[in-house]
Image: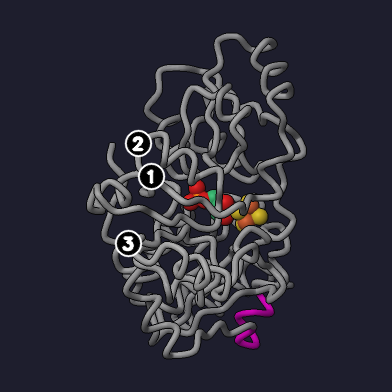
Amino acid sequence: MTVSIIEKINNLKKKKNAVILAHNYQSAEIQDIADFTGDSLELSRKAADTSADVIVFCGVLFMAQTAAILSPKKTVLLPDKTAGCPMADMITAKQLGELKQKYPDAVVVCYVNSPAQVKAISDYCCTSSNAVDIVNSIDAKKKIIFVPDKNLGQVVSERTGRDMVLWPGYCPTHIFATADDVKKIQAAHPDAVTLAHPECPKPVRDCADELLSTGQMLKYAGKSDKKEFIIATEMGIIHTLKKQNPDKTFYPASEKFICPNMKKITLEKVLFSLEDNKYIIKVPQDIAQKAKSALDKMVAVLPKG
Ligand code: 13P
Ligand code: SF4
């Protein structure tokens, strides 16, 4: 009898006391074998709390680095070491250092999609689900530097009315859908509610009924009485939306909404990762210690609602 790849993964998981965490943008087969799927905040909280010895992170590098910083005693594995986030790489610690010199009294809030070195010189980290609450918790007289996502930064600034310096970073996946794409689908499904991720550019955000993190989209769709939803974010989430809501219909705002880095993780790579401890993600201790203070503040703030 041949042992299937999924059985092999499950056996190794038991043997190594490992847990598989998968982001909502992972492919259906990865989400289905994961012990836990979620958005960036939910996965960070899971990584900080787990009693497993090994965390296999099915996501991108900044997520695995975040898990390694929050759980320094665990072995954190990223099954494909080239799975990065282009938006996170749009800012360096040097660039943020220069910005801080320009605005020495500002408080720095950095989106979790950022390099560990940038987190290390930030005051707060946030995700799309708690960015508004984090900014609202900061002294109203303070100017805020927000890096690297200009789109999430604009949403936070609009919702809090705060004076914010925004870095011009963006997600290359979330610019695939245009407002025209969304309007066309809305015209074809006039009863559908449109849920968009705050990483979408303003013209798309302006077409949406709600701006939500991926975890918030899943909660919203589950609670809503509505039966049809247009989803303006990466396609991977459609799998879990359908699975959790078999009586509802979900339309992607664009078939082009695919993050190539998220899709680098495959079942084979998860197996190899467990077999050979590949690829161990470590953050240098001095950077990890500094970044942890900003990340601890992020993990402590649960989104409202
Ligand atoms: P959330 O899942 O936290 O909404 O983030 C989306 C994202 O782009 C992660 O890279
Ligand atoms: Fe980065 Fe965008 Fe991919 Fe998220 S969807 S990991 S922000 S490139």
SS for callout 2 = loop
From the viewer's perspective, is 165 left or right of 192? left
The answer to whether 231 is drawn above or below residue 224 in the figure is below
Q: Give the range drawn in magenta.
A: 271-278
User: Within the magenta stretch, is there residue 275?
Assistant: yes
Q: In x, y percent, where is residue 31?
A: 57, 54
Q: Nearer the viewer, residue 79 or 270?
A: 79
Q: How far apart are marks 3 and 1 (CA)?
A: 24 Å
Q: Which of 4 and 98 is in front in this view?
A: 98
The answer to whether 252 is drawn above or below residue 47 in the figure is above
The answer to whether 70 is drawn above or below residue 166 in the figure is below
Q: In x, y percent, where is residue 30?
A: 62, 58
Tell me the residue at 42%/34% (across/down).
Answer: 158
Amino acid type at image mark 3: Val
* Eye-nearest disc, 3 or 1: 1
Q: In x, y percent, where is residue 290?
A: 37, 80
> Callout 2: 10 Å neighbours few (<14), some, many (20+)?
few
Q: Name the residue under label 3.
A: 299
Is residue 228 in view from this perspective?
yes
Q: Mark 2 points at which residue?
A: 161
Amino acid type at image mark 1: Asp
Where on the picture, by quarter, is residue 207?
A: top right
Q: Distance between the residues labelled 2 and 3?
A: 24 Å
Q: Is the magenta stretch mostly helix, strand or loop?
A: helix
Q: Mark 3 or mark 1, which has the lower sequence index?
A: 1
Where on the picture, by quarter, is residue 175?
A: top right
Residue 207, disc: none
Tell me the residue at 28%/36% (across/down).
Answer: 305
Amino acid type at image mark 2: Gly
Tell me the residue at 52%/85% (across/down).
Answer: 282
Q: Mark 1 points at which residue?
A: 163
